[in-house]
Amino acid sequence: MTAGFWEREREADAVANTRQLLAIEGLFCGGCARGLENRLRSLDGVRDAGVHYLTASAYIDWDPSVCTLARINGCIAAAGYRMIERFHLPDVLGRMHTVAERLTNRLAIAAFFAMWSMGAASVLYFGSGVSSDAAWWLAVASGASAGPALWAGHAIIRMGWRSLRLRTYNIDTLIAAGVLGAVLISGFQLLRGSATVYFDAAAMLLVLRLVGQWIEARTRANSIAALIEMEAAAPETAWRASGGDAVPISQISVGDRIRIPAGAPVTIDGLVLEGTSRLNTAFLSGESAPRSVQVGDYVEAGSLNLDRQLIIRVARSPDDRLIDRMGGRVALELAAKGEPSSVDDTVMTLLAKATPVLAMLAFALGLVQGTGIVEALARALTILIVICPCALAIARPLASLVVVGFGRKAGLRIADPASLDSLARPGSVVFDKTGTLTSGELEVAQVFSCSEFSKNEILALAARAETGIEHPIARAIVSRAGESGPGGLRLARKAIGEDGSGRRVEVTGMPSPVSPQSKGTFVEVRLDDVAVGEICLVDRPDRDVIPLINALRSEGIELRMATGDSRSSAQDIGEAVGLGRAEIEAGQSPLDKADLVRNLPKPVLFVGDGINDAPAMAAADCSISVSRAHAAAAASASIAIVEGGLGKISDAMSLARRFRTTGRRNAALALGYNGVVIPLALGGAMSPLLAALTMTASSLLAIANSIRLGR
């Protein structure tokens, strides 16, 4: 290979090392992800950062002249997490399974010893006739039994400390405060010879949080497994230069010759051997301007070949591409979004900030009322225990687990449960046209001749321009006429080639067809700039689209269809599905679609099917891929329709509304519960034991409410 090749290899590595997806170990909640994200963004030289809790990943874009990967690693380590430079979904899944197994063991230990601690404490609380000496030893036994439970949940206390260092407050902050307060006061009581201890309350707090973490771990593992399963079911493919059908890239080896049709995604890294073209590298580099490539240039997977067919030699194995080093399209899109905030997060943040103030107030009131320092501390502890929103800590992940399972039965793969809050009541819905509102498979319906050429000859001329191009129009023409010639050049709105005599052949979209009585997509065939005929292609709307459009419109949702096709073609489909002229956006590039999404009323739902929809999907608050979608679109979507048509969107919205209602009920339950018990605790009308019992009761109610979601 040439020296230029190795220079480009180094440049590719430089790009990978300044815009990269990292795996993060130790994330256990959305609050942790947001805190770490804020910490990373505060680093000098970091241009952008996003931390995604579900996939345990961090997307970072930094200036290497100001910041280094070592410094980023130091920032992550200082926050209490572990950075893994290479993000690989199967590896992430393996680590999540390990975490789930560890949590299972710790939960079993904590629950077993917490029951013994509560058993000893119950004798103290409800027993009569127990001597003071016996009571003290029972208190010691309660503390000793709670010891293994405290060990099993020590990571929770550590994470509570992390949240303080990250200047963010979450459920672990509250639980750590309650557990440490209960243990310290109980230890002080034992030293004084008193049997009034609260070790059992501390153990109970840890058990409830471990239950929530165990459910979260299962939810995350299931989501990652679904992503891997989706990618395996629709693997990326490549065309061998020798011809034939596309094959999975897993069958491609370094040194193989690969053909990349115009309009097709580049799925392998390699060196251009034949052809010149332009690549859309916006996904890899963030640059919207296409990059010209010629023989000797290096191309990377994740780019889109815009103009002309290329022949490349594979330079990297399929599992060592630049895009793999960046974490792949799926995880990168998710991590770049960061972690959204939910109603539950807002409530927990509010309670976390109010807890120290209320605990100090309870302590001060106790002293003012003359209860003594021990009783005043007990009141403060009661606040720490009673205010802890364990109900939300368990209910939210449990609801996510239930909704993912329920969605799978309904033919929906829900990769990002947090996006359901946006799907429940969208302000706008944007549809791609070809392959989304329609079947996506164009077919030649009619051929019109306006010259001496026959219809078959016009089709043959069109095939000279469309051969070697991956586009619905090209596929329809080539499937009817067969491949012809070395391949054409795909431009923004037309394809160009040459006939056997070297004359220029052009196939271009038509704003106003010669035969207006025919409905469909029209293209004009020109030979040396002289029109010789036109071809009508049809693509039928999805059978579920009209009821869906009517249902969305009746709810006052703003609708748009965004397509790269001409206005006339877009208008035909728009009229067929019930969209008005003002609701149709024609001639849209992938980046135009993303801009459209950003400027519509929030939250925005984008529904698409192709790799060129990825920018718009990333910009949307929630994205849905249809069942016939490209693997990259399906994998990067918040929700993928696995079985069924567009009617599944209504099912997904209904499920999202139930999910949001469940979350709001749980939040209302938590606020209502705290509204009742906090005044009682401040007034000294509750003991730490009663606080623990009421907290458990509220958690059970929230769990029952979340389980109802699946019915």
Image (spheres, rainbow, N blue to C red):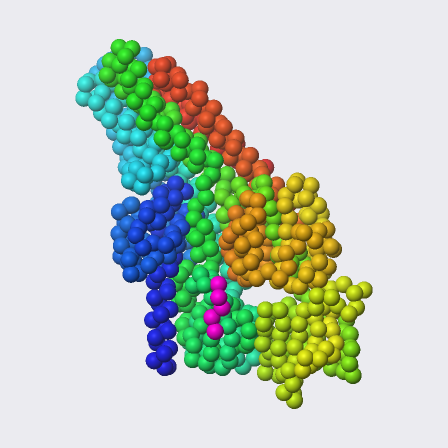
Horizontal arrangement in the rendering, residue 438 relative to residue 90 (left or right)? right
Span of residues in magenta: 288-292
Would you say residue 289 sits in the magenta stretch? yes
> Which image quarter: residue 537?
bottom right
Which residue is found at the position 51% from the left and 80% from the top? 275
Task: Residue 666: give x, y in percent of width and height.
Answer: 49, 31
Horizontal arrangement in the rendering, residue 493 relative to residue 187 (left or right)? right
Task: Residue 336: give x, y in percent of width and height.
Answer: 43, 53
Which residue is found at the position 74% from the left and 79% from the top? 532
Magenta stretch, main secondary structure class: loop
Q: Is residue 536 above or below residue 51?
A: below
Task: Residue 264: give x, y in percent of width and height.
Answer: 55, 69
Would you say residue 16 sits in the magenta stretch? no
Which quadrant does the C terminus fall into? top right
Which residue is found at the position 39% from the left and 16% from the top? 680
Q: Is residue 662 above or below residue 270?
A: above
From the viewer's side, name the closer residue of 214 and 30. Answer: 30
Q: Is residue 198 above or below residue 293?
A: above
Q: Is residue 221 among what the camera can see?
A: no
From the viewer's side, name the closer residue of 253 and 485. Answer: 485
Which quadrant does the N terminus fall into? bottom left
